[in-house]
Image: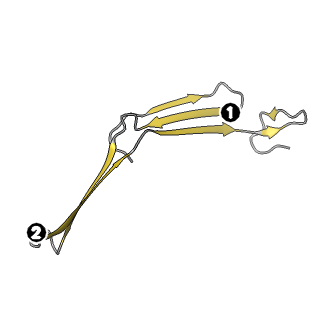
Amino acid sequence: MIGDNLSLFVEHMDLPGLTVQARMSNLLEDELVYDRYVFAGPRASDNLLFRENRRREIGRVMESIVKGSFCANEKGGLSQGRPFGCS
């Protein structure tokens, strides 16, 4: 997970039998920062062996989701109202 950043979520349900969602996160293009300190033994009494510092730039993340029934009827169109099968 990217830290505190701006996200956007839109859902469209006006299509019969379908729900379309679009999500965009990390709109401010925050970076992921990871700091790690490794000691020779207990931190209170031993020396620091090394420090690892990682910074990753992560761009905007986009996601699209389409949910619904996609069964073809006899005329080649999509069948609606049959949530558990296409028969």
- Residue at x 90%, y 33% (from the top left corner): 75
Q: Using a 10 Å C-alpha cutoff, classify the residue at mark 2 as few (fewer than 14 neighbours), some (14 to 19) or many (20 or more).
A: few
Query: Residue 34: x, y in percent?
Result: 29, 54
Query: Residue 80: x, y in percent?
Result: 78, 33
The part of the image, by quadrant, that contains residue 49 is bottom left
- Residue at x 60%, y 39% (from the top left corner): 65
- Side of 10 relative to 29 (left or right): right
Tell me how many marks there are: 2
Q: How is the image coloured?
A: secondary structure
Instruction: Say which amino acid is labelled 1.
Output: Leu
Secondary structure under tag 1 reads: strand
Most extreme residue toward the right is 74
Sequence-wise first label, 1 or 2: 1
Position above or below: 10 against 2: above
- Side of 4 relative to 45 (left or right): right
Mark 1 and mark 2 in contact? Answer it, CB < 8 Å.
Answer: no
Along the viewing direction, whichever of 40 and 75 lies nearer the viewer: 40
- Side of 83 relative to 57 (left or right): right
Secondary structure under tag 2 reads: loop
Instruction: Say which amino acid is labelled 2.
Output: Ala
Position above or below: 42 against 72: below
The residue that label 2 is drawn on is 44
Q: Quadrant of the C terminus?
A: top right
* Label annotation for residue 18: 1
- Residue at x 79%, y 40% (from the top left corner): 71
Most extreme residue toward the left is 45
Find the distance from the CA under tag 1 to the CA under tag 2.
59 Å
Query: Residue 57: x, y in percent?
Result: 36, 46
Most extreme residue toward the top is 14
* Label annotation for residue 75: none
Query: Residue 23: x, y in percent?
Result: 50, 35
